[in-house]
Image: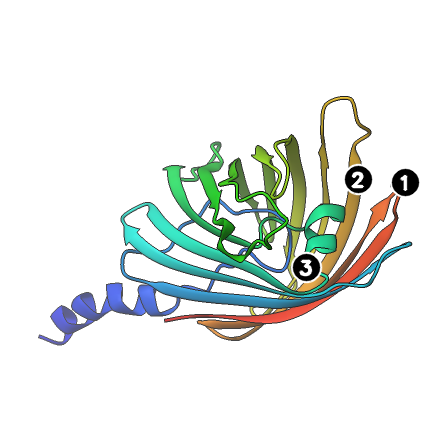
Amino acid sequence: MKYLLLLLLLPISVIAQEKISTEQPDQSYGADVLEKKEFQFETSVYYNSIKENPNPVISTTLLRYGLFKNVEIRLLAEQGDYRDVYISETAHSTYPLAFGTKIALVKEQKYVPGIAIVAYLALPFTNFDHQNSQWSPGFVAAFDKHLSDFTLTLNGGIKEEAFEHKWEYMYTTDLKYEVSEKVQVFAEYFGQYEKQEDPVHNMDSGVMLLLNKKCQIHLAGGMSVAHHPSYYFVNSGIAFKL
């Protein structure tokens, strides 16, 4: 009977020990999705310094819910002071308000990365009267590969701008290192470009601290590279899973 109870409790223990996996604070999407009926809340506050522009202070909040096996839905909100400057002038912004989904396509194996598709649709309900009320879509392919204590993440995608009918290409390369069971650091290159325009190059880095298996806090910062107007940003926040 004792061994039977241990076998029954083993799956519960494995599930309980699974660490929270977040999209913030970096700009890359991972390939993992939430389990069915799981809810996850992620939020960050960004301070942005943009040359020759006001300095936006933005709250970025992501709500995630596991809808089916391998499928989650999400709601993204980016709001705050000088929001439109932030959305228009930085590569780490997305949309003021958007509904989205992430679908896991391939589970990571020994020689195969995890692969997922992320899709967003901007909801123009928070746009001002003088702005286009457009339902801008965005699509990203995400690739993850764990290499011992390192995790390499690659993204590539395309999205329509929030306030104009222009399309831009996005790409990221992110490398995370697990310093300990509770501390993880990352360094990342990310960028975007439009046709007939120079690419916007950026880099950032940060640290994530696991308070427990379901709660994480983070601190990060980054900057543009050879871009006008130049900018830098810092962000901090928290994420937890229910």
Where does label 3 land, which residue? 83
Side of 186 relative to 233 (left or right)? left
Cβ atoms under marks 1 and 2 closer than 8 Å: yes
Place of residue 123 in the rendered image (x, y in percent of width and height, measured from the top left):
47, 49
Q: What label does residue 201 carry, if any? A: 2
**Classed neighbour count for the residue bearing mark 1: other residues with Cα under 10 Å, few (<14), some (14–19), many (≥20):** few
Q: Residue at x 41, y 59 (%)?
A: 64
Which amino acid does the dot numbered 3 rest on? Arg
Cα distance in 3D space between marks 2 and 3: 21 Å
Q: Give the image location of residue 198, x and y in percent.
A: 82, 29
Q: Give the residue at x 73% y 62%.
A: 82
| Mark 3 closeness class: few <14, some 14–19, many ≥20 residues within 10 Å | some
Q: Residue at x 43, y 40 (%)?
A: 108
Q: How is the image coloured?
A: rainbow
Counting residues from the start of the chain, the first of labels 2 and 3 encountered is: 3
The CA distance from mark 3 to mark 1 is 23 Å
- Which picture quadrant has residue 109? top left
Identify residue for label 1: 226
Name the one closer to the observer, 65 or 229: 229
Name the amino acid type tagged 1. Answer: Ala
Instruction: Give the answer, above or below, for where 212 lies relative to 219.
Output: below
- Depth check, mark 2 against mark 3: the one in front is 3
User: The N terminus appears in which quarter of the rendering?
Assistant: bottom left
